[in-house]
Image: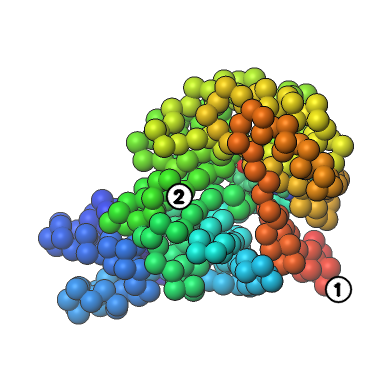
Amino acid sequence: MTTNIVGMDLAEMKAMLGPALPAFRSRQLYEAVYKNRVSSIDDISNFPKDLRASLGQSHSLALPEVQSRFDSVDGTQRYLLKLEDGKTVETVLMPEGERYTFCISSQVGCPVNCQFCLTALMGLERNLSAGEIVGQILKVAALNGLETSIDRLNIVMMGQGEPLLNLPNVIRATRILLDENGVGFSPRRVTVSTSGILPKMLELAKEPVRPKLAISLNASNEEQRQEIVPITRKYHLKDLMEVCRNYPLRSWEKLTFEYVLLKDVNDTDADARRVAKLVSNINCKVNLIALNPGPGIAFETPTPERVHNFQEIVQRAVPCFVRRPRGLDVYAACGQLKRMELTQISERPGTSA
Ligand code: SAH
Ligand code: SF4
């Protein structure tokens, strides 16, 4: 059994290489793994041969493996990636003209029980390590020959999981992803999305190196949010908006509110007016997404006209966009790909769910 180097920061690599080696060796290793993205220790060309051999005995550069891949007609690639312990997570790559957005996972499953979300049905299996979070990017970038230090790539942590309930690993991964000597993403291009874990939002705000923040609002008043996003019973909408109003934005930054539209539940004109009021004094934009339906989800998708009317009302207060659902033909929506696989497996004769 070898120890995986992917996910280690520079200090950890230094400690791992030991005091006998000069400090520049850890920098070479760090750059080889994250900047040049070599796929094996043997390919670290500026390491002497004997160092490569001895390091290779005890360590590896392991990335998640592709268990399955689905390509949509719209160009979206959905991957189910297998981790070292055999568990799987979803990673999605969405090309849009010259740009690409990686949608990555932060946990296997999710403990937050949002009523419209397929990941919620899995419960939480475990947190991802920093290496598994970074590994999703390295793997999918390598498969597509993408250079990560360019400005055309975005990352959103909107796959499986609640990133702020795995904050230490999300921060460790973010530091590596945003380090110009590391993977080299711009801080303007990496976003974490939260269902509203207030104490963790306050912690994130204090981080010197942090991604941008999106908040999944998903309801227009306290009562409705408690129904749809039960964590609101613990972290109230009123307090969430207070934290958002006081969130320390950088000069170039806006908050993003995500709002999943559920037919006849949170999609009326009155809801739109309440949303507009809630966010009107915040430097933000609102992204609307019509529900991606799925098995076991007791909600319906509103019509495009309803979505449009909702957008028109919110837009009077702040910029408001409708997010185009991507990759619908290859199982869209948060958690859906994995859920589909589980369903297929559990439906095989002789196996139980
Ligand atoms: N746990 C985090 C990030 C992952 S979910 C969060 O909740 O923000 C990413 C986004 O997908 C959230 O905005 C969530 O509201 C949305 N989402 C979940 N299930 C969905 C569905 N069935 N249809 C449309 N959007 C969905
Ligand atoms: Fe978890 Fe986000 Fe799904 Fe809610 S919407 S269950 S927080 S992944």
Whether residue 234 is visible: no
**Quadrant in which the N terminus is drawn:** bottom left
Residue hosting label 2: 189
Whether residue 301 is visible: yes
Q: Residues within 10 Å of mark 1 (few under 14, many from 20)?
A: few
- Which element carries disc 2, helix, strand or loop? helix
- Which element carries disc 1, helix, strand or loop? loop
Residue hosting label 1: 349
Dot placed on the residue nearer the N-terminal end, 1 or 2: 2
Mark 1 residue type: Pro
| Disc 1 to disc 2: CB gap under 8 Å | no
**Nearer to us in this view, 60 or 223:** 223
Kindly report which numbered mark, 1 or 2, lies closer to the viewer in this rendering: 2
- Is residue 307 found left or right of 241 in the rendered image? right
CA separation in Å, label 1 and label 2: 45 Å
Q: Confirm or reject: label 1 Cβ below 8 Å from ligand 1.
A: no
x and y, in percent, of residue 232 in the image = 69, 28
- Is residue 250 found left or right of 109 in the rendered image? left
Residue sitting at x 77%, y 43%: 307
x and y, in percent, of residue 48 in the image = 17, 76
Mark 2 residue type: Arg
**Nearer to us in this view, 336 or 308:** 308
Which of the numbered marks, if any, corresponds to residue 65?
none
Question: In the figure, 1 relative to 235: above or below?
Answer: below
**Nearer to us in this view, 70 or 123:** 70
x and y, in percent, of residue 161 in the image = 61, 48
- Is residue 197 found left or right of 19 in the rendered image? right
x and y, in percent, of residue 81 in the image = 57, 66
Q: How is the image coloured?
A: rainbow
Residue sitting at x 39%, y 54%: 185
Question: In the figure, 118 relative to 38: above or below?
Answer: above
Residue sitting at x 72%, y 36%: 312
